[in-house]
């Protein structure tokens, strides 16, 4: 896999939109400046977590964190990189019918192991959740290891 | 909110299917026996994480863990209960075009704080991921606290 | 338990030094300014993690994170508060024969649930580890619940 | 570094006792059977977490988890292996004046990435805490990377 210049926002958007799940979610890369990646998640009706339809499902929040902690490392490495783990603190219910915003940055960029973190905020800038992820650099390609766990 | 008998699999299925996100995901409650909740996630094309379409997106895995760690506590309390956090270890890539299975159980059932854990497995019984969550019992209702974070 | 003014650094030092483990560790409160708590851990020979005696044991790092994520919430609440969990990312080996520094702050201060985070740095200001903790406000006193888990 | 046969309990005890922190803690390897490593931590007065001296400090619990999640992977690999992270759920206060017991096992043994988990129990077999750790196999030696973070 050749390396890509993913610091260009359009290149990064094209890259991440190749995933069918990212397409369905509607993830939009807003900016990448001074190491901070800003991604917007426009609201969809299917995001509601309960029948009262007051808040976005936690799985949507964790998905946004999982994806953006990965993207921000990809921006630096130019390669697809898999998350080894994900830690989420859910701080507030995320209101529905409104965008969510993710602000991700790299904590450590190592030859094998990277760490990144993200803050998820509501459209009115409340702190909804914090996420962290350990990410593997120079992993075998996903198609080589799917189901196998040999990393 | 009155308490519900969610140990009945049909009641639990009805309850969780009230969420639009759960409907879209297609979560199916398989069984609840000896404290172990088994939930099946049938594959959807939109779950693919990369353009190579080899594996399910990590956000789908974390969503399945987030939902089932919550459900298994709900089964015991009879109430909707919010996750305070989520910890995921992604062990293997989840193959696409196949179901995923979640097996969740309660680790601690406290008056205020509960802890539960889940194992995510592939259709061929490989261990895809482990998840854990701290869950708040007797929390204010979600509609009272959305966006507020007063819990 | 009456509330204490723990924003005063000497009061906080006195409070935390009542614990025999804190005494043994030698934790020193350096400052509390603009919500940031700075605690110093002077090196002890017993901290070495391996026979090569190059680095401080991870358990010392996690202890420093566990203690300071708790202290920084105590500063705000004036009460002893128990950690419900601890998440650590170990970023670099901590060199021995040198101080460690913890910088902790509150992420969320709720009526029942608080979240705090800490960065552990070496004497030469390298980022050694990140920690996070969910902390319970208004918990029963420790002597009431030791071994019981009824919170 | 040559590989060691650490499945022999005496060899493992000798290995881990080379660390000054392990010596101070007094960690005792009880058994290694069917992949389950049992380690005992005898009580010391210095473990008390508060002046009321009712419970063991959370840092002692996290240390026991950090060490044993590492040991159980070392047993399989024959090499020293560093923890990349640590996740702890503190379930109950650990009573003082009594032993603690750790039961650790490997969740995944990969060429580069391993995952292990541990349950910490009180002398009367209450579940005090759960821990998990991602551990790096085939890492550079600690003396090569101390302070550097180039893994």
Image: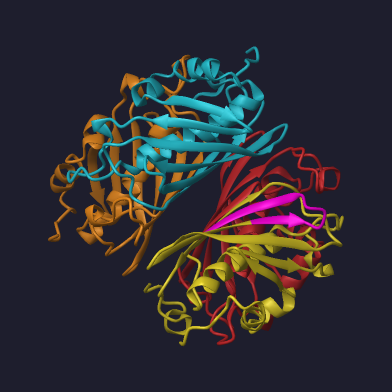
Chain colours: A yellow, B red, C cyan, D orange
The residue depicted at 68 percent of the width and 69 percent of the height is A31
Question: Is residue A121 one of those drawn in magenta?
Answer: yes
Q: How many marks?
A: 0
* Magenta highlight range: A119-133
The residue depicted at 46 percent of the width and 18 percent of the height is D54
Looking at the picture, does residue C14 appear above or below residue B43? above
**Along the line of sight, the residue nearer the viewer: A109 or B107:** A109
Query: Is residue D108 among the parts visible in the rendering?
Result: no
**Along the line of sight, the residue nearer the viewer: D40 or B54:** B54
Furthest-top residue in this view: C2
Could you tell me residue A148's position as x and y percent? 41, 77
Q: Quadrant of the C terminus of chain A?
A: bottom left
The residue depicted at 87 percent of the width and 62 percent of the height is A97
**Along the line of sight, the residue nearer the viewer: D121 or C56:** C56
Could you tell me residue C111's position as x and y percent? 73, 31
Looking at the picture, does residue D136 appear above or below residue C14? below
Q: Is residue B48 left or right of residue B143?
A: left
Question: Is residue D4 one of those drawn in magenta?
Answer: no
Could you tell me residue D37's position as x and y percent? 29, 48
Q: Main secondary structure of the magenta part?
A: strand
Query: Is residue B17 among the parts visible in the rendering?
Result: yes
Could you tell me residue A6's position as x and y percent? 57, 78
């Amino acid at each position: 896999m050749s390396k890509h210049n993913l610091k260009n926002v359009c290149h990064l958007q094209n890259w991440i939109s190749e995933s069918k799940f990212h397409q369905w979610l509607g993830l939009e890369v807003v900016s990448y400046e001074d190491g901070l990646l800003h991604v917007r998640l426009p609201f969809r009706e299917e995001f509601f977590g309960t029948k009262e339809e007051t808040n976005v499902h936690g799985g949507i929040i964790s998905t946004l964190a999982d994806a953006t902690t990965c993207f921000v490392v990809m921006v630096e490495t130019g390669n697809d990189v898999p998350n080894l783990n994900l830690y989420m603190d859910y701080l507030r219910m995320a209101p529905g019918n409104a965008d969510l915003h993710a602000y991700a940055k790299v904590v450590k960029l190592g030859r094998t192991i990277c760490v990144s973190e993200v803050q998820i905020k509501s459209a009115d800038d409340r702190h909804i959740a914090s996420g962290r992820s350990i990410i593997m650099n120079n992993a075998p390609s996903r198609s080589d290891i799917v189901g196998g766990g040999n990393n």
